[in-house]
Image: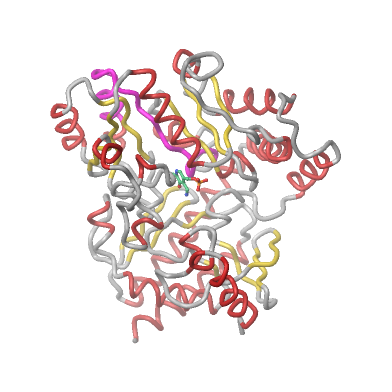
C-alpha cells in the first residue's frame, strides 16, 4: 500500500542520516515507515504511492490556508520571473517589514532570516548584547530550534528521541541556560533570585506546541512580563508557531501581553524557508549595521520567500474572518473528538486553543512538561497509525500540536471525526 515510500526510505537511509532531513519525519516515535509526499493541494496530501490524506499538520504550521493556495502560487510565480536572489535590498522586504509591524502589536522593527532556529539564535544574541548579561531562562518542553543554547530540556523532536540535552553543546553554553517549569511563575522567580543581574532574557512559547499543545495560564504570561520588567530582563515570545495563527497579531495579541522581542517563522514565509525577529526599536537598533550585535544572511530577505510571505500576510491582514474560520474548525474538531473519547472510556486530556490541538492519552491535566510526559505514547502510536490508515495525517509524535488550515470544510471535519471514532474504538479494544 505504501511500497514506494518503503523503497524511498530504504534508499534514503543509505544517503541521509536516519533517512530524513529533520528527525521527527522519520516516524521513530510512532514506528513504521515515513510516508514520502509527492504533492499537496488544499486540505490534501498525496504520497508517492498515490494515497490521499487529509492534512492536520500543514507543514508544521505554515500552510494556514491549505496547500498551494492560489494567492501564494501566483506571488511566487510572478517573483520567479525576476530572478531568485539578489543579495541586495528589494521593495518587498520593505513592504513585508511594514506589514509585520502593522500586524504584530509589540514589533516596531523586524529583521528577516531563513528559519525559526536562526530567529531565536539571533534574538538571544541580541538580548545578551543589549543587556550585557549571559544567562537566559527557557522552559522545560519548549523548543526554540536547534541552536546550542536551546538544546537543554528541549521539546519537539529532541524529547521524542529522548535527547532533550544534545551532545555537542559546550558545557559553558549549557551553564548559561536555566530551565524553569512551564506555567510555574514561582520557579522563574527563584531562578532570577539565584542569578541576580545575570539573566539577559526569558524565552518561551507563549502557547507551547512542542510538548504537545500546552496553554498558558494568562496570569503566568502577565507575571513573566512583570518579573522581566522589574529585573531588567528581556521577555522573548517565540511565536514561530503561534504567530499569525492564534490571531492576526499572534499569542501576544490574544493574551494581551507584550514581549520585548518576538521570533517568527512558518506562516511568515507562506511555506518558503523564512524566519524573523523583531521588537522594540531601541533594542532592534542594536543589530548590525545599525548597532554592534552582528547577524547576517546571504539569502535573508530572499525575493521568492518574501513574495510568498507577503502574499500570505497580506491575505490574513485583509481577511480577518480567517481567524473566526480557524476558531470554528478547531472547536468542531475538539468537540467531536471529545464526544468519541467519552464513548470509548479511554483516559485522555485534550488541549486546544484556536487551530492548535493535542490529544494526550493520560488522565492528568497537561500544563507543563512533566504532566505531558504522563501520556501513554505507545497508545498514541497505535492511534496515529489507525488514523493514517484511514487517510488522516497527524503529527507523528505525542509531543507535537496539530495545526488546522482553513481548507477544511464541514465534510472534511466529518471524515476526520469518523476516522477518529474508528481509531479510538480499535485502540481501546486492543
Ligand atoms: N521555535 C518554535 C516555537 C518552533 O516550533 C520551531 C520549529 N518547530 C522553531 C523555533 C525552529 O524553527 P525551524 O524549524 O524553522 O528552525
Residue range highlighted in magenta: 222-244
Residue 342 horizontal/vertical position (percent):
34, 71
Q: How is the image coloured?
A: secondary structure
Is residue 197 rendered to the left or right of residue 258? left
Residue 60 horizontal/vertical position (percent):
53, 54
Kindly identify the residue that appears in the image at 50 percent across and 58 percent down. 22
Name the image quarter holding residue 88. Answer: top right
Front residue of this view, candidates 23 and 335: 23
| 225 within the magenta span | yes
Residue 172 horizontal/vertical position (percent):
27, 37
Front residue of this view, candidates 247 and 192: 192
Is residue 255 rendered to the left or right of residue 174? right
- Is 11 situated above or below 258? below
Name the image quarter holding residue 269. Answer: top right
Front residue of this view, candidates 281 and 171: 171
Name the image quarter holding residue 1. Answer: bottom right
- Is 275 situated above or below 44? above
Kindly identify the residue that appears in the image at 68 percent across and 27 percent down. 93
| 207 within the magenta span | no
Kindly identify the residue that appears in the image at 67 percent across and 78 percent down. 49
Front residue of this view, candidates 385 and 277: 277
Kindly identify the residue that appears in the image at 38 percent across and 39 percent down. 206
**For the C terminus, which image quadrant?**
bottom left
Residue 181 horizontal/vertical position (percent):
23, 44
Number of residue marks? 0
Amino acid at each position: 500500500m505504501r511500497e514506494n515510500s518503503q523503497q524511498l526510505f530504504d534508499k534514503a537511509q543509505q544517503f541521509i542520516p536516519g533517512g530524513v532531513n529533520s528527525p521527527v519525519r522519520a516516524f521513530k516515535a510512532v514506528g513504521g515507515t515515513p510516508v514520502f509526499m509527492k504533492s499537496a493541494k488544499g486540505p490534501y496530501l498525496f504520497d508517492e504511492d498515490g494515497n490521499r490524506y487529509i492534512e492536520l499538520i500543514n507543514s508544521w504550521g505554515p500552510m494556514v490556508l491549505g496547500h498551494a493556495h492560489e494567492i501564494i502560487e501566483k506571488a511566487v510565480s510572478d517573483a520567479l520571473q525576476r530572478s531568485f536572489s539578489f543579495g541586495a535590498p528589494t521593495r518587498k522586504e520593505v513592504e513585508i517589514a511594514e506589514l509585520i509591524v502593522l500586524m504584530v502589536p509589540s514589533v516596531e522593527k523586524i529583521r528577516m532570516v531563513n528559519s525559526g532556529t536562526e530567529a531565536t539564535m539571533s534574538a538571544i544574541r541580541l538580548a545578551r548584547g543589549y543587556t550585557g548579561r549571559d544567562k537566559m531562562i527557557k522552559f522545560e518542553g519548549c523548543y526554540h530550534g536547534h541552536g546550542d543554547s536551546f538544546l537543554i530540556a528541549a521539546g519537539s523532536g529532541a524529547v521524542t528521541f529522548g535527547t532533550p540535552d544534545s551532545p555537542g553543546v559546550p558545557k559553558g553554553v549549557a551553564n548559561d541556560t536555566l530551565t524553569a517549569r512551564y506555567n510555574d511563575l514561582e520557579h522563574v522567580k527563584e531562578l532570577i533570585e539565584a542569578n541576580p543581574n545575570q539573566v539577559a532574557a526569558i524565552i518561551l512559547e507563549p502557547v507551547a506546541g512542542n510538548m504537545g499543545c500546552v496553554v498558558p495560564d494568562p496570569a503566568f504570561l502577565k507575571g513573566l512580563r512583570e518579573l522581566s520588567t522589574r529585573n531588567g530582563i528581556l521577555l522573548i515570545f517565540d511565536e514561530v508557531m503561534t504567530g499569525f495563527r492564534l490571531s492576526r497579531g499572534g499569542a501576544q495579541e490574544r493574551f494581551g501581553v507584550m514581549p520585548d522581542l518576538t521570533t517568527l517563522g512558518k506562516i511568515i514565509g507562506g511555506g518558503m524557508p523564512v524566519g524573523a525577529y523583531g521588537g522594540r526599536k531601541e533594542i532592534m537598533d542594536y543589530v548590525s549595521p545599525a548597532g554592534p550585535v552582528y547577524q547576517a544572511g546571504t539569502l535573508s530577505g530572499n525575493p521568492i520567500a518574501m513574495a510568498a510571505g507577503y502574499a500570505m500576510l497580506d491575505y490574513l491582514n485583509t481577511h480577518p474572518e480567517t481567524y473566526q474560520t480557524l476558531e470554528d474548525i478547531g472547536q468542531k474538531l475538539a468537540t467531536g473528538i471529545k464526544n468519541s473519547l467519552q464513548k470509548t472510556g479511554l483516559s485522555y486530556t485534550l488541549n486546544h486553543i484556536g487551530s492548535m490541538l493535542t490529544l494526550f492519552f493520560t488522565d492528568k491535566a497537561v500544563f507543563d512538561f512533566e504532566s505531558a510526559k504522563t501520556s501513554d505514547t505507545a497508545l498514541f502510536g497505535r492511534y496515529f497509525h489507525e488514523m493514517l490508515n484511514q487517510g488522516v495525517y497527524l503529527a507523528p509524535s505525542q509531543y507535537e500540536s496539530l495545526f488546522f488550515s482553513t481548507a477544511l470544510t464541514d465534510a472534511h471535519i466529518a471524515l476526520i471525526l469518523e476516522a477518529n471514532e474508528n481509531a479510538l474504538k480499535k485502540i481501546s479494544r486492543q
